[in-house]
Amino acid sequence: MDHGQDLAVITGGARGIGRHLADAFARAGYAVLLTATDGQRASAAAAELAADTAGRVSGAALDAGDPASVAALAARVDEAQEALGARLRVLVNNAGRIESTEGPVWEADPASLAAVVAANVAGPLLVVNALAPLLLATAEATGRPARIIDLNSGSGAQGTNAYAAYSASKLALFRLADSVQHYGFDRGLRIFELSPGVIRSDMTGSMPVHAERTEWTDPAEVAALALALAGGELDAWSGRYVRAGLDTPESLARRATAGPLPAGLRRATVEM
């Protein structure tokens, strides 16, 4: 599919998983707007990726937990759509953080806990609040769905006791997806919870829980899955959780064609 008229916004796209995703989307033909908390770092990363991929990549500052900063991003996206002749087709909620220490929540730094909630819960909520209208407008104008990909985690699906705030924040994304699915699906909006597994990054490198890890998820697997979700090949999985390193575009497509997916499959549900 030609993505020359599609714009992808990737929060936290200057480094780590976000950087791999920004590179992959640019190589796939999308115009890419990546964000970082520091505007100069975002612009520098965008320039490097544009040179490496020969793609259309730009950068913007974003403090995802700050409503004013998110509003400024929405205005920037509007400008990018006009300048590039592209419509916002994909939003990747990647920006996030983890508490600074492992252990009981009562021993954690309160400021670190608050920062995790601001980035990982308030951030995606505010970004979806600001950009979903643009995604819905794209779906209506083109007759093709627009898509949101939340970078989730096994800590959200199953929990990680050592990181209470991070685990709680990733579980919250499932509830955001439930709401977006409920109100947006019939209007052409799809949403996916994508766990990247564990790739080598600044964040995972700082976590004692991974100190002895010898097996890591290949970023190429994460990128392939994200592109398949963004491209519409796996819309049967909208509102559900998928995991790079376990799932592939091919395995998810085979499962979807085998019959209707059970209502609770890959969702954060509790049977009573």
Image: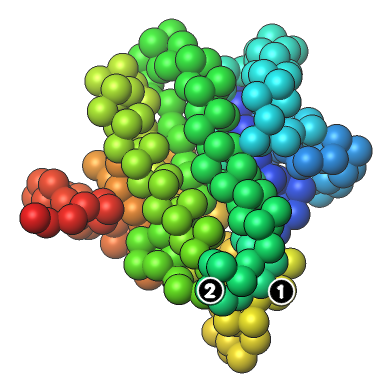
Residue 162 horizontal/vertical position (percent): 52, 74
In this orientation, does residue 39 appear?
yes
Judge from the rendering whether residue 41 lies leftward or rightward of residue 78; answer left or right: right
In this orientation, does residue 10 appear?
no
Residue type (three-letter) at the residue carrying disc 1? Ser
Above or below, 90 relative to 226: above
Quarter where residue 118 is shown: top right
Eye-nearest disc, 1 or 2: 2
Residue type (three-letter) at the residue carrying disc 2? Pro
Judge from the rendering whether residue 1 lies leftward or rightward of residue 16; answer left or right: left
Q: Of marks 1 and 2, which one's residue comes earlier in the chain? A: 2
Quarter where residue 75 is shown: top right
Mark 2 highlights which residue?
104
Nearer to me, 137 or 40: 40
Q: Report the Cα–Cα distance between label 1 and label 2.
A: 18 Å
Element under disc 1 = loop
Residue appearing at x 47%, y 42% in the figure: 149
Residue appearing at x 87%, y 44% in the figure: 41
Residue appearing at x 41%, y 59% in the figure: 156
Element under disc 2 = loop
Nearer to me, 222 or 1: 222
Mark 1 highlights which residue?
206
Above or below, 81 relative to 201: above
Residue appearing at x 68%, y 63% in the figure: 109
